[in-house]
Image (cartoon, helix red, strand yellow):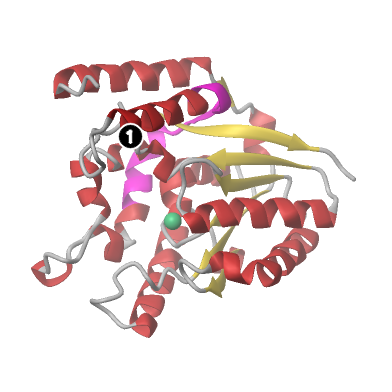
Amino acid sequence: MMDGIPVRRALRRLQRMALERRASPFDADALRCPAMVFAPHPDDETLGCGGTILQKRRVGATVRIVCLTDGASSHPDLLTHDELKAVRAREVRGAAKVLGVEEKDLFLLGFPDRELDACREAAVARVAELLWRHRPEQLFVPYARGEHLDHVSTNHIVREAVARVGLPVTLLEYAVWAWRHWPMVGLRGTRRSLLAGAVSTRMGLWMAREFRTKVLIRDVLAQKRAALALHASQMERRDAEPRWHTLEDVDGGEFLPCFFEDYELYRRIDISAR
Ligand SMILES: [Zn+2]
């Protein structure tokens, strides 16, 4: 696998440009549509669609954010469960405010981090109730391929709730961990085998085929960064503790820039009424 860093960075730029060029932009109606953003963990709302939330709020669209888990397992050996739970709830409240989302429009469902699938039935019921009560027309959910378990579960839970409620919606799937594919990031950390390379590269092909909707976020990047910075437990190493991992550490710093390009990209799926 060709992984000379300058060559890969050039390929990364080309792949990103190709993705952005092929995608269709949100039109004015899509931007104004009332939306609900589903985040498996506090910080996914900002990483995956922070720029889009800002652009939608700018034109007066209603945006509600739903965090499914409490995020209390991100640093299990360094803070207690209750401490982390409180920290992450405080952080997402701050980030939502920067994104223009009022506290009354932020819902922390508090299911246990890394164990969302075990609470699936209760989560579907809570999400269906929120959909029924607020009638959002656009739902932002994590992509179901190449993502962590809670992200895949969130996708399945929201789809199940949509089927139960039977209202027409547009799903917009956003990638978080699926961006960790070659050539977006190097193959460090994973075994540099041919198989790992092939699987990783294939993720990029799937995304190229499926991510065909884009929202221009260039003019709100500073606010998106400011919102993410408020997720300080994920962004800053506490007390110089080497075991305190941050998003900057992922893939030698190559992961985080995937979220600060000119566009946020989505896989769009229209679901008609039952
Ligand atoms: Zn997450």
Give me the residue at 33% from left, 34% from top. Answer: 196
Q: Does any atom of ligand 1 lie closer than 8 Å to the CB of label 1?
A: no
Q: Is residue 222 magenta?
A: yes
Q: Is residue 238 left or right of residue 46?
A: left
What segment is highlighted magenta in the picture? 208-226
Amino acid beneath label 1: Ala
Q: Is residue 212 above or below residue 185?
A: above
Q: Is residue 179 above or below residue 134?
A: above
Give me the residue at 24% from left, 17% from top. Answer: 10
What secondary structure do most residues of the magenta stretch adopt? helix
Residue 185 position by quadrant: top left
Sort mark 1 into few (<14), some (14-19) or many (20+) by Cα contacts within 10 Å.
some
Quadrant for the C terminus in the image? top right
Q: Is residue 96 above or below residue 177?
A: below
From the image, tell me which residue sits under label 1: 196
Can you name the residue that lies furthest to the right here? 274
Quadrant for the N terminus in the image? top left
Q: Is residue 2 above or below residue 86?
A: above
Q: Position of residue 188 (x, y in %)?
A: 20, 39
Q: Position of residue 249 (x, y in %)?
A: 20, 50
Q: Is residue 37 magenta?
A: no
Give me the residue at 49% from left, 44% from top. Answer: 49
